[in-house]
Image (cartoon, helix red, strand yellow):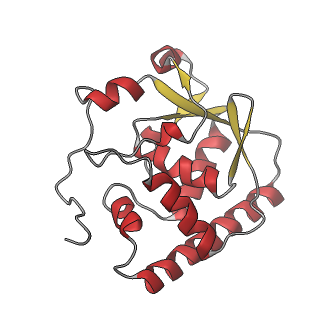
């Protein structure tokens, strides 16, 4: 166990107090008017982010507790994240990301790295200008600072959120990123 990392952490449920606060919150990502060239560049930037993450893992080894924390809760892999999000966006007019999901943590990191940008209440894909180990480290640290005393992260503190996720379940053109599985 490194840096006090909790390996037996249970997944949050609706009964947990912090989830009651955030369980109704969500963010949305809309398709936008992009073409294949944009999507290709976006995926290449995700590959750069993944390479930067690998560099960080090699350089920091055991000196990066924030990365340790994320490794224990979600699959921090920018290529997989980008592919799954892009697949959802292509197949749905809007993708919903519940704030209590691990995908919200990934969305917060993508936002900090400028892979998504806020426009009004929604997020849209955007192309980051620079992705380096330093920018990836900064994004991870920013998310890690939302951790509470029970070791839960709160990406809702970093993202624009809406309330009323229960109302969205009846709309068929909406995909929920937390329900996507390869």
Q: Quadrant of residue 61?
A: bottom left
Seen as rendered, the residue at the extreme bottom is 59
- Residue 27 percent across, percent down from the top left: 57, 33
Quarter of the N terminus within the rendering = bottom left
Left or right of 175? Residue 8 is: left
- Residue 21 percent across, percent down from the top left: 38, 24
Q: 25 or 75: which is nearer to us?
A: 25
Q: How many marks?
A: 0
Q: Residue at x 52, y 55 (%)?
A: 142
**Position above or below: 173 against 34:** above
Q: Quadrant of residue 44?
A: bottom right
Q: Residue at x 40, y 60 (%)?
A: 75
Seen as rendered, the residue at the extreme left is 8
Left or right of 155? Residue 150 is: left
**Position above or below: 178 against 135:** above
Q: 147 or 113: which is nearer to us?
A: 147
Q: Residue at x 55, y 42 (%)?
A: 158
Q: Residue at x 55, y 54 (%)?
A: 109
- Residue 12 percent across, percent down from the top left: 27, 38
Q: 151 or 31: which is nearer to us?
A: 151
């Amino acid at each position: 166990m490194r840096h006090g990392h909790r390996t037996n952490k249970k997944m949050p449920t609706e009964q947990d107090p912090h989830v009651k606060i955030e369980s109704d919150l969500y963010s949305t990502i809309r398709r936008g008017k992009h073409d294949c060239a944009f999507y290709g560049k976006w995926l290449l930037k995700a590959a750069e982010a993944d390479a930067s993450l690998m560099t960080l893992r090699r350089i920091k080894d055991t000196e990066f507790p924030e990365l340790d924390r994320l490794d224990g809760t979600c699959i921090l892999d920018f290529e997989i994240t980008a592919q799954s999000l892009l697949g959802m966006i292509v197949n749905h007019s809007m993708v919903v990301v519940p704030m209590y999901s691990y995908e919200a943590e990934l969305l917060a990191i993508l936002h900090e790295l400028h892979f998504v940008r806020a426009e009004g209440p929604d997020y849209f894909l955007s192309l980051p200008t620079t992705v380096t180990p330093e920018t990836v480290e900064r994004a991870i640290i920013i998310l890690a600072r939302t951790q509470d005393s029970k070791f839960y992260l709160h990406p809702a503190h970093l993202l624009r959120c809406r309330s009323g996720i229960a109302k969205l379940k009846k709309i068929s053109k909406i995909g929920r990123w937390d329900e996507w599985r390869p």
